Image (cartoon, helix red, strand yellow):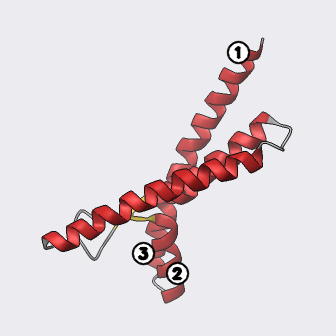
Amino acid sequence: MDADTQLAYGIFWSLYAVAFVIFFIMVSKLFRVLPLYGLRTLLQAALVVILLTPVQSTEAVNWWIPAWLHGGYEFILGEADEAGRAFFNLGLASLVMLLVWVLDLVRYRLAKR
Protein backbone atom coordinates (compact mmCIF):
# COMPACT_ATOMS: atom_id res chain seq x y z
CA MET A 1 0.00 0.00 0.00
CA ASP A 2 1.27 3.43 -0.87
CA ALA A 3 1.30 6.49 1.38
CA ASP A 4 -1.89 7.98 -0.10
CA THR A 5 -3.82 4.81 0.60
CA GLN A 6 -2.57 4.69 4.18
CA LEU A 7 -3.50 8.36 4.62
CA ALA A 8 -7.01 7.68 3.32
CA TYR A 9 -7.31 4.75 5.75
CA GLY A 10 -6.27 6.98 8.66
CA ILE A 11 -8.65 9.74 7.61
CA PHE A 12 -11.53 7.24 7.35
CA TRP A 13 -11.00 5.90 10.87
CA SER A 14 -10.57 9.40 12.28
CA LEU A 15 -13.82 10.61 10.71
CA TYR A 16 -15.59 7.40 11.71
CA ALA A 17 -14.49 7.84 15.34
CA VAL A 18 -15.58 11.50 15.45
CA ALA A 19 -18.93 10.67 13.83
CA PHE A 20 -19.44 7.83 16.32
CA VAL A 21 -18.80 10.10 19.31
CA ILE A 22 -21.26 12.69 18.02
CA PHE A 23 -23.86 10.02 17.21
CA PHE A 24 -23.37 8.33 20.59
CA ILE A 25 -23.88 11.60 22.48
CA MET A 26 -27.03 12.40 20.51
CA VAL A 27 -28.54 8.94 20.97
CA SER A 28 -27.59 8.91 24.68
CA LYS A 29 -29.61 12.08 25.14
CA LEU A 30 -32.58 10.28 23.59
CA PHE A 31 -32.06 7.32 25.91
CA ARG A 32 -32.40 9.57 28.99
CA VAL A 33 -36.18 9.40 28.72
CA LEU A 34 -36.04 5.68 29.55
CA PRO A 35 -36.75 5.16 33.25
CA LEU A 36 -34.47 2.17 33.89
CA TYR A 37 -30.71 2.64 34.22
CA GLY A 38 -30.05 -0.93 33.08
CA LEU A 39 -32.04 -0.52 29.88
CA ARG A 40 -30.31 2.76 29.03
CA THR A 41 -26.86 1.31 29.51
CA LEU A 42 -27.76 -1.89 27.65
CA LEU A 43 -28.81 0.13 24.61
CA GLN A 44 -25.63 2.20 24.82
CA ALA A 45 -23.53 -0.96 25.07
CA ALA A 46 -25.31 -2.45 22.05
CA LEU A 47 -24.63 0.73 20.11
CA VAL A 48 -20.93 0.54 20.94
CA VAL A 49 -20.69 -3.12 19.97
CA ILE A 50 -22.55 -2.76 16.70
CA LEU A 51 -20.72 0.32 15.47
CA LEU A 52 -17.20 -0.13 16.86
CA THR A 53 -16.43 -3.83 16.46
CA PRO A 54 -13.76 -4.30 13.78
CA VAL A 55 -12.88 -7.24 11.56
CA GLN A 56 -9.62 -7.69 9.69
CA SER A 57 -9.81 -7.14 5.96
CA THR A 58 -8.97 -9.99 3.62
CA GLU A 59 -8.20 -7.53 0.83
CA ALA A 60 -5.49 -5.50 2.54
CA VAL A 61 -3.00 -6.66 5.16
CA ASN A 62 -3.31 -5.04 8.62
CA TRP A 63 -6.47 -3.14 7.73
CA TRP A 64 -9.53 -3.26 9.92
CA ILE A 65 -13.11 -2.63 8.81
CA PRO A 66 -16.27 -2.07 10.88
CA ALA A 67 -17.74 -5.56 11.28
CA TRP A 68 -21.34 -4.48 10.62
CA LEU A 69 -20.27 -2.96 7.31
CA HIS A 70 -18.09 -5.87 6.21
CA GLY A 71 -20.54 -8.52 7.39
CA GLY A 72 -23.53 -6.88 5.77
CA TYR A 73 -21.73 -6.30 2.50
CA GLU A 74 -20.40 -9.84 2.29
CA PHE A 75 -23.80 -11.25 3.27
CA ILE A 76 -25.43 -9.36 0.42
CA LEU A 77 -22.78 -10.64 -1.99
CA GLY A 78 -23.37 -14.20 -0.80
CA GLU A 79 -19.97 -14.73 0.84
CA ALA A 80 -21.16 -16.65 3.89
CA ASP A 81 -17.66 -17.36 5.24
CA GLU A 82 -16.62 -13.71 5.30
CA ALA A 83 -19.98 -12.59 6.69
CA GLY A 84 -19.74 -15.30 9.35
CA ARG A 85 -16.28 -14.09 10.35
CA ALA A 86 -17.59 -10.55 10.80
CA PHE A 87 -20.66 -11.70 12.72
CA PHE A 88 -18.45 -13.92 14.91
CA ASN A 89 -16.47 -10.81 15.87
CA LEU A 90 -19.74 -9.04 16.66
CA GLY A 91 -20.85 -11.97 18.82
CA LEU A 92 -17.56 -12.08 20.68
CA ALA A 93 -17.66 -8.34 21.29
CA SER A 94 -21.26 -8.70 22.48
CA LEU A 95 -20.25 -11.27 25.08
CA VAL A 96 -17.44 -9.05 26.36
CA MET A 97 -19.74 -6.03 26.49
CA LEU A 98 -22.40 -8.09 28.27
CA LEU A 99 -19.86 -8.86 30.99
CA VAL A 100 -18.95 -5.17 31.25
CA TRP A 101 -22.64 -4.26 31.39
CA VAL A 102 -23.34 -6.72 34.22
CA LEU A 103 -20.33 -5.42 36.16
CA ASP A 104 -21.59 -1.87 35.66
CA LEU A 105 -25.01 -2.86 37.00
CA VAL A 106 -23.34 -4.36 40.08
CA ARG A 107 -21.32 -1.16 40.55
CA TYR A 108 -24.48 0.93 40.16
CA ARG A 109 -26.36 -1.19 42.67
CA LEU A 110 -23.55 -1.01 45.24
CA ALA A 111 -23.10 2.74 44.77
CA LYS A 112 -26.81 3.36 45.17
CA ARG A 113 -26.91 1.81 48.67
- Residue at image location 44% in from the left, 61% down from the top: 16
Question: What label sits on residue 111 in the rendered view?
Answer: 1
x and y, in percent, of residue 110 in the image:
71, 15
Which amino acid type corresponds to the residue marked 1 in the rendered image?
Ala
- Label 2: which secondary element: helix
Q: Is residue 107 left or right of residue 5?
A: right
Residue 94 or residue 35, whichever sits in front: 35
Please tell me which residue lies in front, 83 or 46: 46
- Residue type at tag 2: Phe
Give the alpha-carbon distance from disc 1 to disc 2, as whole Å: 44 Å
Q: Nearer the viewer, mark 3 or mark 1?
A: 1
Q: Farthest top residue?
A: 113
Residue drawn at (45%, 73%) of the image: 70
Q: Which secondary structure lies at badge 1?
A: helix
Which numbered disc flags the more N-terminal residue, 3 or 2?
2
| Residue 64 seen in render | no
Which residue in the structure is indicated by mark 3? Answer: 82
Element marked by disc 3: helix
